[in-house]
Image (cartoon, helix red, strand yellow):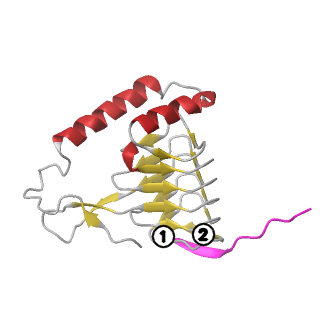
Amino acid sequence: MEEKKPVKPDQKSANESPWPFEDRLLRLLWEFSWFVFCEWTPKPLNPWRLFWLRLFGARIDGTPFVHQRARIAIPSNLTLHDRACLGDRANAYSLGQIEIGTRATVAQEAYLSTGTHDFARTEIPLVTAKITIGEDAFLGARVFVMPGVTIGARSVIGACSVVTKDVPPDVTAAGNPCRVLGPRTPAVSG
């Protein structure tokens, strides 16, 4: 698991924002742009949504799919590989980096949270850590992924699971907290 990094280690006050004014203004512009130009678009206008994501700094390889009702906090912290899918009402809370691998699916209402707080410190600073979703992985509906977690390639995470630790490749996992249930059954060739 990647070490969590404080966003602003010299933060003096619990009430002070860890985000500079320019960053907050850019986030506001992003949210306005997504609402006006993308949120109403039907599925076939995915290239238009990818255009706006690229414009705001998302790294896009090939042609992933981003549902019009997906939520992305900071596009410049998002990397989508070819045919990755961010589903209906999926939330990429990308205060830190999120990378979704080739052909990986993040199903409806899943929540990828790269941000949390260090509750051991009295000022409770914001900390972030990268989330990595491996190629061909599948995250079921309403899965919650904590900061710093890596989901291995080709693994399946069952619906409503809370993923607090790394999941190895080629397994099925589920639960709260999520645990490995066993290896994935290989595809039957015919």
Residue at horizontal 55 percent and vertical 47 percent from the top:
61
Q: How far apart are marks 1 and 2 (CA)?
A: 10 Å
Answer left or right for 51 relative to 19: right
Magenta stretch: includes residue 182: yes
Count of numbered circles in the view: 2
Would residue 120 be counted in the magenta stretch?
Answer: no
Q: Position of residue 67 (x, y in %)?
A: 55, 37
Residue at image location 24% in from the left, 42% down from the top: 23
Residue on which the image places disc 1: 177
At 30% across and 38% down in the image, what residue appears?
27
Amino acid marked by disc 2: Ala
- Residue at (59%, 44%) from the top-left corner? 64
Image location (x, y in percent) of residue 181: 63, 74
Residue 36 lies, with reference to residue 6, above or below; the image says: above
138 shown above or below 17:
below
Check disc 2 and report its element: helix, strand or loop: strand
Residue pointed to by mark 2: 173
Q: In this view, does 13 lie to the left or right of 69?
A: left
Judging depth in this view, the residue of 23 and 180 nearest the camera is: 23
User: Quadrant of the rendered structure where residue 113 is?
Assistant: bottom left
Q: What stretch is highlighted in magenta?
A: 177-190
Residue toward you, 131 or 90: 131
Question: Dot 1: what SS?
Answer: loop
**Most extreme residue toward the right, as rendered?**
190
* 99 lies left or right of 26: right
**Quadrant of the snapshot with the C terminus:** bottom right
